[in-house]
Amino acid sequence: SKNFDEQAKRIEDLHSERLNSREDEFRKKVDELEQQCKSFLEDLDSSQEQCRKLAGTKIDLLGELAQVRTDSNQILSETMANYESVLAQRSQEISSLSHQLEELEKERRRCEEESEAFHKDYSQRLQEKDRELADERAQVKSLAGDMAVQAQKVNEL
């Protein structure tokens, strides 16, 4: 009976170690996903800041363009060609950054959805493992009870 109790305890400890190991793996995966999301959010913040700066630059360039128009028609035509080129480039950059921002936003939403799904799945798996462990414990206790009854019968013989 003592030997059986020790075996039951070892089995219970082994199941507990396995469950803890799986829990650690899931936690590491959650941490990795959270780190990825954090990185994407930092990229998103950086892109938004660049868009704000480019928008400010565009406004500044438009102000300079208005000043040039008041100076003279000759300076206006030369300067217009130069600034329109710069504006087109900046607009392309803004457009490109806006597209990147949209992609980063999609990626952030995808990460959040994956993280939520992972957390839900993780919780379900933990609950499932808890139920399995409880079932296994009940089986071990039942077997221990059966063994005790059998040991008592043997002792009575």
Image (spheres, rainbow, N blue to C red):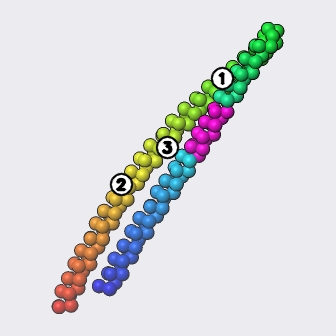
Task: Give the amino acid type for the residue marked by disc 1 in the picture.
Answer: Ser
Q: Quadrant of residue 47?
A: top right
Q: Residue 42: say if magenta.
A: yes
Residue 145 in picture, x, y percent from top left:
23, 79
Task: Give the amino acid type for the residue marked by disc 2 in the picture.
Answer: Gln
| Residue under label 3 | 111
Mark 2 nearby-residue class (10 Å; few <14, some 14–19, many ≥20) = few
Q: Secondary structure at mark 1?
A: helix
Task: Give the amino acid type for the residue marked by disc 3 in the picture.
Answer: Cys
Q: Secondary structure at mark 2?
A: helix
Instruction: Please say whether residue 35 is visible from this viewpoint.
Output: yes
Residue shown at 56% from the left, 43% from the top:
41
Foreground pick, 97 / 146: 97
Mark toward the viewer: 2 or 1? 1
Q: CA distance from mark 2 to mark 3?
A: 20 Å
Taking the view exactly as shown, the residue that stands out farthest to the bottom is 156
The residue stretch that appears in magenta: 39-54
Picture layout, residue 84 above or below residue 115: above
| Residue under label 2 | 124
| Residue under label 1 | 91
